Structure formats: structure tokens, C-alpha cells
């Protein structure tokens, strides 16, 4: 039995980036209707950047790489934001690769495994930390603080088993770790509740660079 499905697969269109000193951003994601191959892209700055073939990433220092190979955002959270903002938000508006339905993206455990369609397996790693490019795209006052405070971040995912993805593919959670934290809990601790930072270390599949950062912060505390 599936837990949800992929409503839309989105690939970026290169645009100029006025928000950062970078020539290009791939945040402008548009739906594609043919199957897209997804593979581990390698290290963040030196690899293939996005997990989806054909998906550009401009800020390779902060986006992409194995632990941010794919970004998923739930249609249910878009519906919530539409009421809050008083405007419509199409899938891809937040720059996600997969617009989902029926699966609790923010409640996903770091380290669980999603099987999508017949081949692809993905693993949630952490929430999306908003940046200046996102702020410029949304044109909403105090967007970075608001997005952070509401903690409806969507999830970055790493590729466990490469494969194709297409709109309509089912999503099944095939594994949940016995000891972990959810995407929402981890993001809330990391951004707003540093007194609980040690809790993040319970997630065995926390990205290595993030684990090192948490350990360093705990040492300073």
C-alpha cells in the first residue's frame, strides 16, 4: 500500500540571480512529463550537483550534492500557505523537484527510505534552510523568518537506489529507523532551539557535515 504519490516532477530553468553574486539560479522549477533519471550527484561543490538529470543548480556551495540530491515539498503545505498568503502557489513555486501528495514530508524521519515507482529509493536528510534567492522569488516581507518559524520546510533527500521518476508514481515508506528525529523536529531544534541540539545526534543518517557542525556547536555551548 502506498503512503502517497508524486503529483509533479519539476526541473529548473536557468535564470539570472539578482539576490546573490552568482550568474544563475535553478530555483525556477517547471513540471516535466517524461520520466527523469535520478542518481547520486556526488560531492556538493565538485560533483554533478542535482540528483535529477537536467536540473541546474547555481549556488553549488549551499545546494545540491549527495545529501541534497532531491528536494520534496507537499501539496498539502502549499494549500496551507495559499490561505496564509492569499494567493495561489503552483507546484514548483518553492523550487522543489518533487511535489508530493499524501505523504507527511515534514513528519518523515531522517533516515527512513521512500520507494518511488518501480526503481527509485530516496532517504530524507534534513529540511530546507531558506536563502536570499528564495526570499527574492517569493517577494513576501520577512519571508525567511516566516518560512523558518512556520517549519513547513519540505525535505531534502539523498539517493539510495537510482531510478526514474515521473508524475503519478506512488511513494511507499519501506523503512523507518528505530532511533531518529523527524524533519520538522530537527529543523526546529537547529534553527530555534539550540538547547536541544544533542537530540539531532540521535539521527544516524544525519548528513556528515551537519553532524560535525552540531558537535562543534555543542562543544562551544
Image: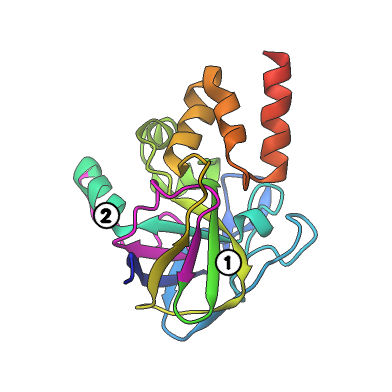
Residue 98 visible, this angle = yes
Asked if residue 111 lies in the magenta stretch, the reply is: yes
Question: Is 92 located above or below residue 132 in the figure?
Answer: below
In the displayed structure image, the side of residue 75 where residue 49 appears, left or right: right
Q: From this viewpoint, which residue is outermost toward the bottom?
A: 34
Disc 1 on helix, strand or loop? loop
Question: Image quadrant of residue 195?
Answer: top right
In the displayed structure image, the side of residue 189 where residue 66 appears, left or right: right
What residue is shown with label 2? 76
First in sequence, mark 2 or 1: give its number: 1
Residue 13 visible, this angle = no
Residue 118 placed where, x, y %? 48, 82
Please state which of residues 48 and 89 is positioned toward the viewer in this rendering.
48
Q: Name which residue lies at 38% across and 64% down.
A: 99
As drawn, the label of residue 216 is none
Give the magenta range. Answer: 86-115
Question: Is 163 located above or below residue 152 in the figure?
Answer: below
Residue 135 placed where, x, y %? 46, 42
Q: From this viewpoint, which residue is outermost toward the right?
A: 46
Question: Is 213 located above or below residue 217 in the figure?
Answer: below
In the displayed structure image, the side of residue 104 where residue 199 appears, left or right: right
Q: Name which residue lies at 48% across and 54% down.
A: 176
Label 1 crowd (10 A; few <14 / some 14-19 / many >=20): some
Asked if residue 54 lies in the magenta stretch, the reply is: no
Q: Name which residue lies at 59% across and 70% down.
A: 55
What residue is shown with label 1? 14
Disc 2 on helix, strand or loop? helix
Amino acid at each position: 500500500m502506498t503512503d502517497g504519490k508524486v503529483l509533479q516532477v519539476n526541473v529548473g530553468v536557468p535564470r539570472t540571480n539578482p539576490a546573490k553574486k552568482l550568474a544563475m539560479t535553478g530555483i525556477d522549477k517547471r513540471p516535466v512529463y517524461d520520466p527523469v533519471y535520478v542518481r547520486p550527484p556526488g560531492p556538493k561543490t565538485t560533483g554533478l550537483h542535482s540528483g535529477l538529470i537536467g536540473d541546474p543548480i547555481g549556488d553549488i556551495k549551499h545546494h545540491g550534492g549527495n545529501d541534497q540530491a532531491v528536494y520534496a515539498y507537499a501539496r498539502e503545505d502549499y494549500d496551507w500557505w495559499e490561505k496564509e498568503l492569499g494567493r495561489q502557489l503552483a507546484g514548483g513555486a518553492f523550487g522543489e523537484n518533487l511535489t508530493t501528495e499524501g505523504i507527511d514530508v515534514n513528519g518523515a524521519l531522517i533516515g527512513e527510505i521512500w520507494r518511488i515507482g518501480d526503481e527509485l529509493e530516496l532517504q530524507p536528510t534534513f529540511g530546507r534552510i531558506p536563502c536570499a534567492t528564495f526570499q527574492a522569488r517569493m517577494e513576501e516581507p520577512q519571508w525567511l523568518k516566516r518560512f523558518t518559524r512556520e517549519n513547513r520546510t519540505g525535505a531534502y533527500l539523498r539517493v539510495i537506489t537510482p531510478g526514474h521518476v515521473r508524475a503519478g508514481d506512488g511513494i511507499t515508506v519501506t523503512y523507518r529507523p528505530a532511533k531518529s528525529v523527524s524533519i520538522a523536529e530537527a529543523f526546529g531544534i537547529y534553527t530555534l532551539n539550540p538547547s536541544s541540539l544533542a537530540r539531532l545526534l540521535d539521527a544516524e543518517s544525519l548528513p556528515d557535515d551537519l553532524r560535525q557542525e552540531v558537535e562543534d556547536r555543542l562543544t562551544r555551548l
